[in-house]
Image (tube, rainbow, N blue to C red):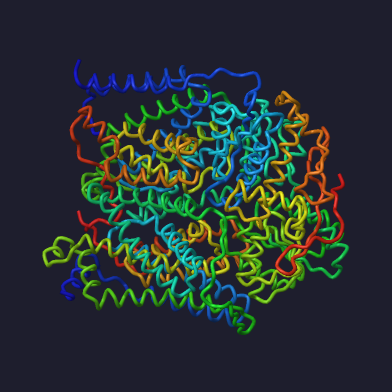
Amino acid sequence: MRLRRVTAASVAVTVVIAAVIALLPLTLSNYHRATGASVAVFFIAILALNIVTGYTGQISIGHGAFMAVGGYTTAILTHDHGWSDLPTLPAAAVVGFVAGVIVGLPALRFHGVYLALTTFAVALAVPQLAKNYPNFTGGTEGLALPTHSGLWLYEVGWAVAGVMFVIAWFLLRGRTGRAFRAVRDSEVAAASSGVTLAVYKTVAFGISAAMAGVAGSVYVLVNNFVNPDVFGLTLSLYILIGAVVGGLGSLWGVLVGAAFIQLLPIALTTSHISSSQSVPVIFGAVVIGVMALLPLGAANLLRVALHFGSQSRQSSDIHLGTEGR
Amino acid sequence: MTAVVAALERRLWFRPSTSWIVPAALVGVAVFLVVGSLRSSLFAQQTISGLANGGIYASLAVALVLIYRATEVINFAQGALATFTTYVAWQLMAWGLSYWPAFACTLGIAFAGGFLVELVAIRPVERRGSQITAVIAAIGLLILVEGSVGWIWGNQVKFMPAPFPSHIYNVGGVAFSRQDLSTIGISIAAVLVLWLFFRFTKVGLAMRAAAVRPQAARLVGVRVSWMLSFGWGLAAVLGAVAGMMAAASPSVLLQPSMMDGILIYAFAAAVVGGLESAAGAVIGALLIGVLLNLLGSYVSWVTPQLLLPVAFVVMLIVLLVKPSGLFGRTRVRRV
Amino acid sequence: MTRRMKGALVLAVLAIVVAAGSAFAASTATPGVTRSTIKIGGTFPLTGPAALYSVIPKAENAYFQYVNARGGVNGRKINFKVYDDGYNPANTVPLTKKLVEQDKVFAVYGSLGTAPTLATRDYLNKAKVPQVLVATGDSYWGAQYKRYPWTIGFQPDYPGESRVYGEFIKSKVPQAKIGVLMQDDAYGQNYYNGLIQGLGAAKSKIVDVEKYDATQTDVSQQVVKLKAAGANVFALFALPTQTITALVVATKVGWHPVTFINNVSSSPTFMAIAQKSGADVTNDITATYVNDVWNNPDTASAKLYKTILAKYDKGADPLDANNVYGVASAWTFVKALSMAGKNPTRASLMNAFTHLNAKNPFLYPGVSLATTPTERFPIDQQILEQYKNGGWHPFGRIFSKAR
C-alpha cells in the first residue's frame, strides 16, 4: 500500500472493518470467538512477515521460529515465574526483536534463495533447541497454561492486532518504510541514495521478529499450551502462504490471508463433504489455484474492486534468484 | 550454438574465482576421512553409513538443482513428488511386476508426471505471477501431493522390496551392504548421465539455452516452455530414483512423510554445493551425510536434538565463507 | 453514495450476515445424549508423522458400528466423531473445543498422544467433560486423578511395562550387559525409568545408553555404538519407524543381542516389515496385554475380532495389533456406558469408569479391567511374548504392577 495521502475512502473502510471486528463477538459462540482469536494471531504473524518480505524484499521461511521464541517467552514467564498474561507480550516482543537481529545479521550476507535457506534452517532449529532444554521449556510434554474464555481471547487478540496494525502503518508510511521499499526495489540504488543497507535490513528483521513474537504469545494464550510440535516448519510455510495469498506489500490483504490459512483448513477438516484424508489435497489445490488466478493476492482484487489508491507497482516480484538475470 | 550458450553462461553470471581453495579443502576432508577410517573401525563404519545416507540426499539434491537452474523455483514439493512415485513403484510391484521392470516403468511415469505438474500447476502460476508465487504454488503442491499419497494408499507403514538381496560385506570390522554401495553409485551415475545429456545432446543444449537466455533461445527455435516442463520431468525422474533408493535403505520406511527429513538435507546439500552445480550437490550431500554421523558419534555435546541445528550452522559457516556455495560461481549483481 | 462507500457497506453487511449464521444453540440437559443416540468424539493423528496410528480410531468405530447394529447401548446408538489433529496440540485444542461446544459431545474418547491430551486436559476438566480412555501410556492419567478427575487412561503405562523387562532381565539374564536405545524425550525417559526400577541392583549392568531425536529416522550410528560397547542385551525403546531401523541395522552389523521391544512398536505388522527388510528378530521379546488372536484364531474373541474388522473396517489388517487395541478400547467404553445407567450423565459415566471390574474379551485372558476411585489404571497386567516362526508367542506368567 503506497498511499501517500490518507484517502477518505481508506479511512472509512478501516473504520468499518474495525467496527465489524469489534462487534462480531456479540453474535459469535464461545468456540467461534476462540477461532476469531486465532485468526488474529495469524493476522499479526502475516503482518510481521509482510514487513520483512513484502516491504523490505527479504524472503523469510522462518517466522514460525520467531513465533516460537515469543510463545515460549510467554509460556515460561507465566508457568514458571508467575507473571500474568498480558505483561508477557511486551517481553515477547523484546525477545523476538533480539532473535530477529541475531538472524538478520548473518542474513546480511545472503540473498534470495540463500536467505530463504537460512530462515528455513532457523525454522527447523528453534523447535529442536526447545526440545534440547526440557527443564527450561517443558520439552516434548510442553507447558500447560490456564485457559481463557473465547471472549477474552478474541478481545486480547484483536486489540493486539489493532495495535500492531497501527504501528505497522505508521512505520511503513514514514521514512523507515520508504527506506525498506528502497531496499526491496533496488539495493544498489538504495545504498547510493544513502540508505545504510545493513542497518535497515537488520531493523526490518528485528521489528518483524518482534511482531511475530507477539503473535506467538497470543497463539500460546489461545491454545493454553506450548510444545515444540506447535511451532513446526508447517507453521512457517502457512504464514508465507497467507502473506502471498493476501498480497505481499499490502496491509489489507493481511486480513484475507489470515482468514484463508486459519478458516479454510478448519472448515475442511470438520465439514462433512470431505473425508479427513482429502483435506490436504483440497487445500493444496486451492492454494495453487489462488496463485494461478490471483498471483498478486487478494489485496490486488480488493484494490481493483474498490479503486483504492493508485494501481501501484506490484511488490510481489520478490526475487529469489540473485539479481542480474 | 554450443559455444554461444557456454560463453553466455560464463559471461552473464560468472567471475573467475580463486578456484583452487575448494578442491584443496575437499581433498583435505577426504584424507581426514581415510586416515580416520584406517585408525578406527567405528569411524570407518560411521563414515560409510554417512556416505550411504548422503547418496540418498544426493539424488534429491540434484533434482532441486535441476529445477532451480531451469526455472529459479525452490521446489518444496520435490520430496513429496519423490514419495508419490515411490508409492507408484510399490503399487506396480503389488500388482505383480518384479523390481526392475517396476523401477523402469516408474521412471517413465515420473517423467510424465513431472512434465504434467509443471504444465498444469506451475506454468499458469509463473506466467501471471512472479517467482514467489511459483514458490507458494510449490508449497501448495507439497501439501497436495503428500495428502494424495495418504488418501490413495493410506497412512500405514508399508514394506518396500529391495532391489538387491541384502548382502552384507564385512571389511575389517566395517559392515556395509550392497544397497549402500549401489545408492552411492547410482547417485553418481545419475549426475554423470545428466552431465552427458546437457553437454552432448541437442535437447540438453536447448534446455541450457532456454535457462540462460529465453528470448534469444526462442528466436533460434527453442520451445522454451516445453524445455521448462522437460526440466521438471527430468527432476521428477531423479526424485523417483531418490525415493526408491531411500525406501530400499533400512532407515527409511514407506510412509507418506518418508521424504520430509531427506528433503531438508537435500536442500542444505544443494545450497552448500552451489545451486548451479549438480556435482556440487552430490558432494555437498555426501559431506552432509558424513558430517551428521561423525558429529553425532564423536562430538559429545551434540545431543540428538542439536544434530540438525549444528549441521545447519556448519553449512551456514561454509556459506559465509563462500556465499554461492562450494561450486557455485560468484554472480555479478546488476543495478 | 460513492462506489467506494457502497463497496465498503456491502463488505460490512456480508460480514455481519456471516457471523449471524453461527448463533448459539440451545443446550440440552445432558449434552450429546438423546433418546436414541449418544455422541462422542476424539482427536487422532490421521495425517502427519504419527499417522501410522490412524488405524486405531477406525477399529474403534468398527466396534461401535457392531454394537449399534445390535441395538446400541440401552437403546442408544453411538455416534463417534473423529477429528484429525496431526499430532499438533495447536490443532487438538480448537478441535476439542469444537467437539465440546459445537458438536456437543457427551464425552471426549480415545484421544491419542501425550502432548495433545495434556493440552486439552485443563479445558475438559474445567468444563467437566469426560476425557476417557486416552491412547497414551503416560502415567499422568492414573496418577494425577485428584487434580484431573475427569481424565482416565487405558493402556498399561510405559514405566510399568519396562519395569517388567527389568525384572525379567534381573532374574533370567544374569550375564546381561545392557545397551539401551531410547528416544531423547519424556517418552523414552518413561521407559528408561521403569527399566531402572525393574532392574534394581542390576542397573549397573547397563553398559551404554544411546539416544535419538524423533526427527531422526536413521539410528544406525547409535546401534553401532551399542554394539561397540559390548552389550548383549538390547533395550529398544523407540517409535515404530526407528525400531524397525534399529532391528535391521543390528543384524546388518552382525549384532545379535537379546532384544526387548516396547509394546507400542512391536505390532506384528512392524515385525514383519523388519524381518522382510533383513532383520533377524527371532527370540525378540515384548510385553502385551491384548488378546492373542493370531495364535488362537478359533476362540470366540478372535473370530469376533475378525468378523468386526471384515464387516465394519474393510481393508484393515487383522495382523496389526493396533486394531486389537482399538476394539478392546471401544469395548471398554461400551461397558462403562452400559454401567452408566439408562439415562447416562457425564458424572455417571465417570463413576462407571472408576468402578470397572470386567473381563474384556479382547484383552489377554487373565488380564482384567479393574479400577477403583483411587486406583485409576484400567489395565495393570502384562505378559511377555517371544517372536518365533513369524509371530509372537506369549510365555511365562502374567506380571502385575505392584503399587
Quadrant in which the C terminus of chain A appears:
bottom left
Quadrant in which the N terminus of chain A appears:
top left
Question: Of B99 and B279, which appears nearest the observer?
Answer: B99
Q: Which residue of the protein is positioned furthest toward the bottom in this rendering?
A: B172
Above-or-below relation of B265 to C311: below
Label total for image? 0
Q: Which residue of the protein is positioned furthest toward the front in this rendering?
A: C70
Q: Is residue C56 left or right of residue A6?
A: right
Residue at (25% x, 34% y) in the render: A301
Give x and y (percent) for residue A12. Answer: 28, 19
Q: Which residue of the protein is positioned furthest toward the left in this rendering?
A: B219
Above-or-below relation of C223 to A227: below
Question: Of C339 and C161, which appears nearest the observer?
Answer: C339
Above-or-below relation of B72 to B244: above
Whether residue A99 is visible to the viewer of this picture, yes or no, is no
**Quadrant housing residue B217:** bottom left
Q: Is residue C106 left or right of residue C203?
A: left
Give x and y (percent) for residue B207. Answer: 23, 67
Above-or-below relation of A154 to B56: above
Residue at (28% x, 59% y) in the render: B71
**Quadrant housing residue C107:** top right
Residue at (23% x, 72% y) in the render: B203
Whether residue B134 is visible to the viewer of this picture, yes or no, is yes
Q: Which residue of the protein is positioned furthest toward the top in this rendering?
A: C1
Give x and y (percent) for residue C149. Answer: 74, 31
Give x and y (percent) for residue A16. Answer: 33, 19
